Image (cartoon, grey):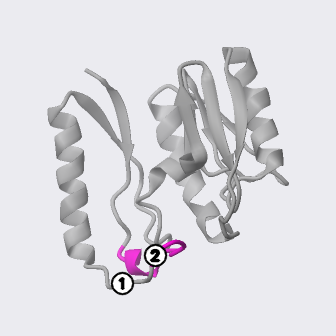
Amino acid sequence: MNGTALVRAPSSRLAEGIVTHIRRTPVDVARARAQHAAYADALAVSGWMIAQAPAAEDCPDSVFIEDTVAVCEDLAVLARPGAQARRAEVPGVAGILRSIGLRTAAIQEPGTLDGGDVLQAGYTVYVGRGGRTNGAGIRQLRALLAPLGRTVIAVPLSGVPAP
């Protein structure tokens, strides 16, 4: 077994998701769901245990579950997304994380952090600071990960629009 992969099926409202760096194009939700199921199957065949987060039909971007959490060892840091519309995605993830045995902590206001802005390389954690993750969120993540021996480095992102 490789570990645990956290997944969440696409919402029926996927086509309403936030579009930042590309032009909006039509979304075939049935096709997206079939592709997502194939993705989860491929992970399982490759030896990953699949942890399915509860559906979040009211959250168009909820399939992008990596934005809701950053996991380091046995600690799952629940994000506080910079896009207000995405914050409702986080509570449903907390329960599944606890059920697979992870401790949880959460980024608090005024901090914002998107898990997709976090990159771990060994004991160094790089965090993009820009439109969705702010300095307060990075400082909180740094304090949470320091006891695990991690060094958190902020990486300024230029040209990234705010949510």
Image: magenta residue range:
12-22
| Picture quadrant where residue 15 is located | bottom left
Decide if residue 134 is on the left or right side of residue 78. right
Determine which of the numbered discs, if any, sits on residue 22 in the image: 2
Amino acid type of the residue tagged 2 in the rendering: Ile
CA separation in Å, label 2 and label 1: 9 Å
Amino acid type of the residue tagged 1 in the rendering: Thr
Q: What residue appears at the point 41 percent right and 49 percent down from the top-left corner?
A: 53
* Location of mark 1 (residue): 25
Q: How many labels does the image show?
A: 2
Relative height, residue 88 to residue 100 (above, below): below
> Which element type, helix, strand or loop, lies under badge 2?
loop
Q: What residue appears at the point 54 percent right and 21 percent down from the top-left corner?
A: 73
Most frequent secondary structure within the magenta stretch: loop
Q: What residue appears at the point 55 percent right and 30 percent down from the top-left corner?
A: 120
| Mark 2 vs 1: CB contact within 8 A | yes
Relative height, residue 103 to residue 43 (above, below): above
Decide if residue 40 is on the left or right side of residue 157. left
